[in-house]
Amino acid sequence: MQLHPFNTSRGIISMEPDNQTSSSEFILLGLSEKPEQETLLFALFLCMYVVTVVGNLLIILAISTDSHLHTPMYFFLANLSLVDFCLATDTVPKMLVSIQIKSKSISYSCCLTQMYFFHFFGIMDSVLIAVMAYDRFVAVCHPLHYPSIMSPRLCGLLVGGPWVFSGFISLTHILLMARLVFCGTNELPHYFCDLTPLLRLSCTDTSVNKIFVLIVAGMVIATPFICILASYARIIVAIVKVPSAGGRKKTLSTCSSHLSVVVLFYGTTIGVYLCPSSVLTAMKEKASAVMYTAVTPMLNPFIYSLRNRDLKGALMKLVNRKITSTS
């Protein structure tokens, strides 16, 4: 049996046997393989996606048009809304189109592109949530120095740095994935091209990929989560020292929305990327993925707007302005 030095279908060096032909496309099996359930799933996810798009874009527009909201906290929130919108757009529309046209195939290049942007915006989500925790820590524990600490320059670095970092990490994931060969089944038990299910389909050694996944999970999931816990530990200590019950309640209310997002996001991502693969099933993976790619981006605008008087006021002004301009 001869070895061929190049995999001409992808243009990458390979030393795989000639009888191993790499898949040029994958079949996304979706959330359900029962046709009778697909209509319900289509309607459900279409509604969720529309709410996600409208909710997050309204948050961005309200913050950008109201000068009273041009503060670090709302600057980070606007970026989080942009990332949530992009994260949902990367995964949900493809699933909706696949259900509508009754075709579950996705090309190899499109699969890697989807995976790149999924990791890019997923990493951004994780880091931004940690940045927002730091912002709350400075606001509660160092209120007098807050304007000087959270300067425009630092805010720019806290947002711009993660964009560069996310791009580098996501590109490395793709380059490591491109060296693999998929010569067995091309059926992916998922509704988008996620890293872990793809690694299971490869017939080549994936040990380097798995090690990198653990390293990245430690950097972009475990480390931000630990920073969040440390920030809130200091915040709780500061709240306990507040003399009045009203003051403690007001201080805690400024952090409650962010805490809800932390629970939603990290509760699912830690379960998928830091739990042993033997514990996870395909159904659990898909359920967790739905939470952080569809449910969390949809709920974040409600979580922040319903408990924030300033943001609710800005949203009402924006809506009233649009109604007035169209009447």
Image (cartoon, rainbow, N blue to C red):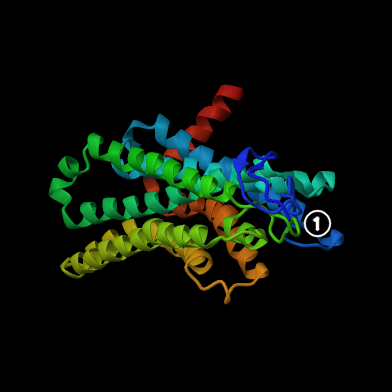
Task: Tell me if residue 25 can be seen.
Answer: yes
User: Which residue sits at x=13%, y=47%?
Assistant: 145
Q: In the rendered view, does 185 fall on the left or right side of 63? A: right
**Image quadrant occupied by the N terminus:** bottom right
Q: Residues within 10 Å of mark 1 (few under 14, many from 20)?
A: some
Residue 236 location in percent, x, y? 24, 68
Residue 9 location in percent, x, y? 70, 40
Q: Nearer the viewer, residue 56 or 153?
A: 153
Q: Nearer the viewer, residue 184 or 248?
A: 184
Corner quadrant of residue 185: bottom right
Residue 210 location in percent, x, y? 50, 62
The relative height of residue 95 versus residue 250 in the rendered view (above or below) is: above
Q: In the rendered view, does 252 fall on the left or right side of 293? A: left
Residue that mark 1 sits on? 38
Corner quadrant of residue 163: top left
Q: SS for tag 1? A: helix
Residue 216 location in percent, x, y? 42, 56
* Amino acid bearing label 1: Glu
Q: How many numbered marks, from 0 up?
A: 1
The relative height of residue 42 versus residue 107 in the rendered view (above or below) is: below
User: Which residue sits at x=47%, y=46%?
Assistant: 172
